[in-house]
Amino acid sequence: MNTPALPAFDTIRLELQGTVAVITLNRPQRLNAAPPQMFDELRAALQQLPTLGARALLITGEGRAFCSGADLQSRAEAGADTPAETRGARTFRALTQHYSPTMLALSQLGIPVVTAVNGVAAGIGCSLALAGDFVLAARSAYFLEAFVNIGLVPDGGATWMLARQVGKARATEMIMLGERIAAEKAEQWGLIHKAVDDAELMAQAMALAERLASGPTRALGMMRQGLARALSQSYEEALATEAAHQSLAADSADAAEGGKAFLERRKPVFRGL
């Protein structure tokens, strides 16, 4: 079988390890600070995953950081040719045309997502890190909603995610005090899946991604989408969504294999079909 060609990018790296796609934010000299281009390239990479046969996605950062936030220097440079545009207008354009569409695309991805947070995850980088279905963080890593420290407000869906993940009180602490939340504290809060030793981060994250990739991919994709919808749905609407998803899952080859394996008392072999 021919290995599919992987697109090349300037600010991220896309690799395929078996059926696990690995996206590495790749601006280590800037602590992976994210210009709009990085999120455009991230969105383009997400769009490629179905054609690559990826059944799970792992996102991490190169070097000492996961992502230190939006690249404010690049934002300023991007506005150099539009002197009539205010900083607020440039920021609105960057969010609505670059950052937010990528966060939305990630939330709608049809395969499970693991994030391996290898260092600071701040600002939009914090939002990206917490968008994983499973968030693993090195013990030296930390999460920071730094916006209040520079007179801005959270973006990247942070207010939506934090209020649901850790509750209003802790979300308020994070966004209004702008203090670091260490990986172990994040685990205690239920903000992330697990804090692990730095040296074990990538091995454990990949092992989890491979476990997910070997599962019933279609069902897992609908699980993550159903969970996201349930956070804003009524109970009645959630029941309807579950019924629709269950109908699709029941017709899948993986469901047939799962039922057969159960009757034959063996471990199922899922193919993501």
Image (cartoon, grey):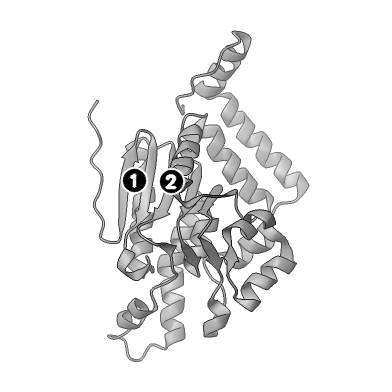
Is residue 90 shown above or below 130? below
- Location of mark 1 (residue): 48
Q: Position of residue 174 (x, y in %)?
A: 64, 70
Q: Nearer the viewer, residue 65 or 131?
A: 65
Is residue 247 shown above or below 157? above
Left or right side of 163 for 253? left
Q: Secondary structure at mark 2?
A: helix
Q: Which mark is residue 262?
A: none
Residue type at numbered disc 1: Gln
Q: CA distance from mark 2 to mark 1?
A: 23 Å
Q: Nearer the viewer, residue 124 or 173?
A: 173
Q: Nearer the viewer, residue 172 or 157?
A: 172
Which residue sits at x=35%, y=59%? 63
Q: Secondary structure at mark 1?
A: helix
Q: Nearer the viewer, residue 210 or 1?
A: 210
Local packing at callout 1 (Cα closer than 10 Å; few below 14, some 14-19, many 20+) is some
Q: Nearer the viewer, mark 2 or mark 1?
A: 2
Q: Position of residue 267 (x, y in %)?
A: 55, 17
Q: Which mark is residue 202?
A: 2
Identify the residue at the far bottom of this view: 84
Which residue sits at x=58%, y=29%? 249
Identify the residue at the far right of this view: 235
The N terminus, quarter of image = top left
Is residue 243 shown above or below 201? above
**Mark positioned earlier in the residue sequence (2 or 1):** 1
Which residue sits at x=34%, y=51%? 45
Residue type at numbered disc 2: Met
